[in-house]
Each structure stands twice: as structure tokens, then as C-alpha cells.
Image (tube, grey):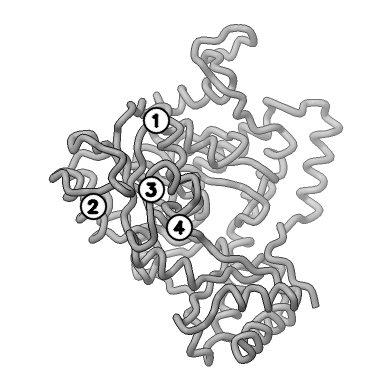
């Protein structure tokens, strides 16, 4: 049996919507983009949304609005997709990291407290120390809702308010999740969702910026469209912009998907619960744990954590030979080659992140995964561990 790592949940309504756009002749800058924006803002519980061509673009536009300066410091998690810190580097500022909570895998508020204090007191060493910083240049925190689970936003918000730090929410993996009943995407000055094919909903490629901040909204609309003004006159460019637009084909797919989002999330939750049951007698596998403040988990991936004695990479190779789609999830950002080259990071700086990252496996996960496929996956995990 071959079980792929992920698969988008595409129905006839999505196919009909895309075909309808093709027949309409309006392939860009049309009503489906506007409708997806309206529905995304509604889902996040905010006033505004700007559809773009990726979650990365959405985050880049937020950082553009915040006018980062060379030498500014922004704290984020080392356990995430690399975009979470790249968006700081794009603006010539400096990303710094704070270790994670071993249960939720999100940034740990107690570690964040210590990181902030180290920066303020000038005690923080960035990488191998080649990068120097000014302690008064700490400007903000990029919080990530990892794997569909909200960050502990009350704790993080209280810390940022105390130190007058800006908050940006990377909720690219967590559309539909709620923290104490409040939607992800609604924390900080702005948030971002991403709609890659393995996400809870998809537009193929695409993302949405969500915010209550009117000026940020207006700027993002301009910059995503080559810097055109509010009236979007075609040859009138008032800002140095980009082509970050989402096309109508993608947006029409997204409208159908977001209208089905609750159904898609329920299906994914059922798949996750079934995995939990199948692994309940496996003492060497820790299944994902939902935090006490998570009032709705938006299952993005299903990542298991192996005991220290199990050789993860050998198990990955075994599963691949058995045609089970699998992957390590994630590699620590600070140990990515580009970050080691730029900052001189070495292993051992963020021990919890490094320990978790060395033991994770993302298993096949999507809303249409069958019971038989899951049973096969779990059986192969168990066999693999027994034979290593």
C-alpha cells in the first residue's frame, strides 16, 4: 500500500468554481479575490483581509508596514518553517530565537521572558558572537501558531505590552484554530494564513493577511499590486510595490474551501483522533498534545515524537521503503545552513528545540485518509521500531 504524506480535499464544487472562472475570462483582480478576503477576515474575527500569492508574502507586507531598520531585533521561534525568521532578514533586521515548550512545541513564555531580559541587559549572544546588537533595538515578537495549535497568547501579549514590543502573528499553519475562544490571526497588529496544498484549506499557492489596522490594510493592498494607489489606476504607482496578487483561479478555489473549512477541520480532527487511538499502546511514541488554552485545534500535520533511543532517520528510511509518506518536521531554523553561515550558530544553543526536532516524524495526514491507510501506517511504524 502506498500512502502519500498529504493530499488536498478537492470536490466537484471546487472544480466547477475554477472552470467557471476560466469561462468568465476574468482571471485576475476579480470578485473571487474580494470574496475570499471577506470570508478570511470573518474567520479571523477582524475587519480587513488582503489576499496574496503566499503566506510568506502576507508576512513580508506586515513587516514592510512596521518599517524595520537595520539592526532592529525581533524574537521568534527556532522551531518553525524558515519564513518566520526570514521575514526579519529581508528587512535587514536581526532575528533572534527563544526556545520552545516541549508539550505544545510553541514558543515558551518563560523562555521568552528570559530572552527579552538577556537582550535588555546586553547578555544575549547571537550565534558565535560575530553579530553585535544594541540592547535598545528590541522591537517585536513574531509568534507562530505551530502545527495548528495556538501560542499562549495571553502570556506573550502581557510580556510584549510590558516591554512595548510589537506583535506579528504567523498563523500560516492554523486557520480555524482558537485560543480561549478567540480566532488565530487576530492577535497582534496583523496575522497571516497560508493555503499551500498540504494546509487545512488550499488555493494551490496563496495566502491572506488579516488585520484590524486600517493603514496597514491600505498599504498592503497597494504594495501587493505594484504600489498602485487606493484607486488602483493602472499606471499610477505611489509606492515601491510588488506583484504579490492572488489570481481569480486560486481565489475561486479558496472561496469554496473556506466555506467548507469547518467540515475540513472536523474530518482532520477525526483522522488525528484515530491515530491517537492506534498509537495508544505505543510507549515509545508521544502523540500530539493539545494545550489547555486551545479551544479548537486546527490540525495541519500529525507529528509524532519518538523516544530518545529510537534512531529517527533509520525509521524514516524504513517507512519510505514501505511507501509510507513521512518527513522530519521541522529542522531548527538556527541550524539551517544559511543561518549558520550568517550567524555562526552551533548545536546546543536551544536544547529543547534541537531535542524535539531530532525525534519528530510527520506521518501521512489529510482529511480523506482512510482507516485502512492509517492502520497500515501505524503497523509500519511499529514494525520499523521493532526491526531497527
Query: Do the numbered discs 4 and 3 sit on residues whose CB atoms are within 8 Å?
Result: no
Q: Name the residue beneath numbered marker 4.
A: 332
Camera-side mark, 4 or 3 = 3
Dot 2 or dot 4, earlier in sequence? 2
Q: The N terminus lies in which quarter of the figure?
A: bottom right
Closest to the camera, between mark 1 and mark 3, is: 3
Is there a contact, CB below 8 Å, between mark 1 and mark 3?
no
At which x and y percent is residue 46? 43, 40
- Ranked by sequence position, the earlier of labels 1 and 4 is 1
Of the residues under marks 4 and 3, which one precedes in the sequence? Answer: 4
Residue 175 appearing in the image: no
Q: Which mark is residue 344?
A: 3
Query: Measuring 26% from the left and 55% from the top, which residue is drawn there?
Result: 112
Sort mark 3 into few (<14), some (14-19) or many (20+) by Cα contacts within 10 Å. Answer: some
Q: Which mark is residue 115?
A: 2
Which element is circle 2 on?
helix
Q: Nearer the viewer, mark 2 or mark 3?
A: 3
Q: Residue 344, how many percent across, how many down?
A: 38, 48
| Sooner in the amino-acid sequence: mark 2 or mark 3 | 2
> Image quadrant of residue 242?
top right
Mark-to-mark CA distance, 4 and 3: 14 Å
SS for callout 3: loop
Q: Is residue 163 left or right of residue 147?
A: left
Q: Which residue is mark 1?
A: 92
Amino acid at each position: 500500500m502506498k500512502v502519500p504524506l498529504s493530499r488536498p480535499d478537492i470536490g466537484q464544487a471546487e472544480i466547477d468554481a475554477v472552470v467557471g472562472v476560466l469561462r468568465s475570462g476574468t482571471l485576475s483582480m476579480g470578485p473571487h479575490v474580494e470574496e475570499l478576503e471577506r470570508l478570511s477576515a470573518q474567520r479571523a474575527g477582524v475587519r480587513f483581509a488582503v489576499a496574496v500569492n503566499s503566506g510568506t508574502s502576507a508576512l513580508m507586507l506586515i513587516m514592510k508596514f512596521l518599517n524595520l531598520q537595520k539592526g532592529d531585533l525581533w524574537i521568534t521561534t527556532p522551531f518553525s518553517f524558515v519564513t518566520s525568521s526570514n521575514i526579519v532578514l529581508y528587512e535587514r533586521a536581526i532575528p533572534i530565537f527563544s526556545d520552545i515548550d516541549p508539550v505544545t512545541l510553541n514558543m515558551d513564555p518563560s523562555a521568552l521572558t528570559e530572552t527579552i531580559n538577556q537582550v535588555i541587559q546586553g547578555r544575549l549572544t547571537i550565534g558565535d558572537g560575530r553579530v553585535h546588537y544594541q540592547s535598545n533595538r528590541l522591537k517585536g515578537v513574531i509568534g507562530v501558531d505551530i502545527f495548528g495549535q495556538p501560542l499562549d497568547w495571553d502570556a506573550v501579549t502581557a510580556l510584549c505590552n510590558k516591554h512595548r514590543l510589537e506583535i506579528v502573528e504567523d498563523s500560516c499553519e492554523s486557520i480555524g484554530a482558537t485560543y480561549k475562544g478567540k480566532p488565530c490571526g487576530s492577535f497582534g497588529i496583523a496575522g497571516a494564513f497560508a493555503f499551500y496544498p498540504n494546509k487545512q484549506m488550499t488555493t494551490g499557492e496563496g495566502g491572506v493577511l488579516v488585520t484590524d489596522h486600517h493603514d496597514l490594510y491600505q498599504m498592503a493592498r497597494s504594495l501587493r499590486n505594484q504600489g498602485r494607489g487606493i484607486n488602483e489606476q493602472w499606471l499610477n504607482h505611489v509606492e515601491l510595490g510588488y506583484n504579490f496578487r492572488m489570481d481569480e483561479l486560486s481565489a475561486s478555489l479558496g472561496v469554496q474551501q473556506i466555506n467548507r473549512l469547518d467540515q475540513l477541520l472536523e474530518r482532520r480532527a477525526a483522522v488525528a483522533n484515530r491515530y491517537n487511538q492506534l498509537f495508544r499502546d505505543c510507549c515509545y511514541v508521544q502523540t500530539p498534545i493539545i494545550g489547555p488554552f486551545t479551544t479548537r485545534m486546527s490540525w495541519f500535520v500529525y507529528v509524532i515524537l519518538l523516544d530518545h533511543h529510537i534512531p529517527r532517520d533509520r525509521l524514516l528510511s524504513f517507512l519510505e521503503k514501505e511507501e509510507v509518506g513521512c518527513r522530519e518536521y521541522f529542522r531548527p531554523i538556527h541550524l539551517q545552513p544559511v543561518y549558520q553561515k550568517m550567524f555562526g550558530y552551533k548545536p546546543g544553543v536551544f536544547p529543547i528545540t534541537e531535542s524535539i526536532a531530532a525525534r519528530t516524524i510527520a506521518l501521512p495526514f489529510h482529511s480523506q485518509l482512510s482507516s485502512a491507510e492509517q492502520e497500515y501506517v501505524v503497523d509500519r511504524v511499529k514494525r520499523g521500531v521493532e526491526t531497527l
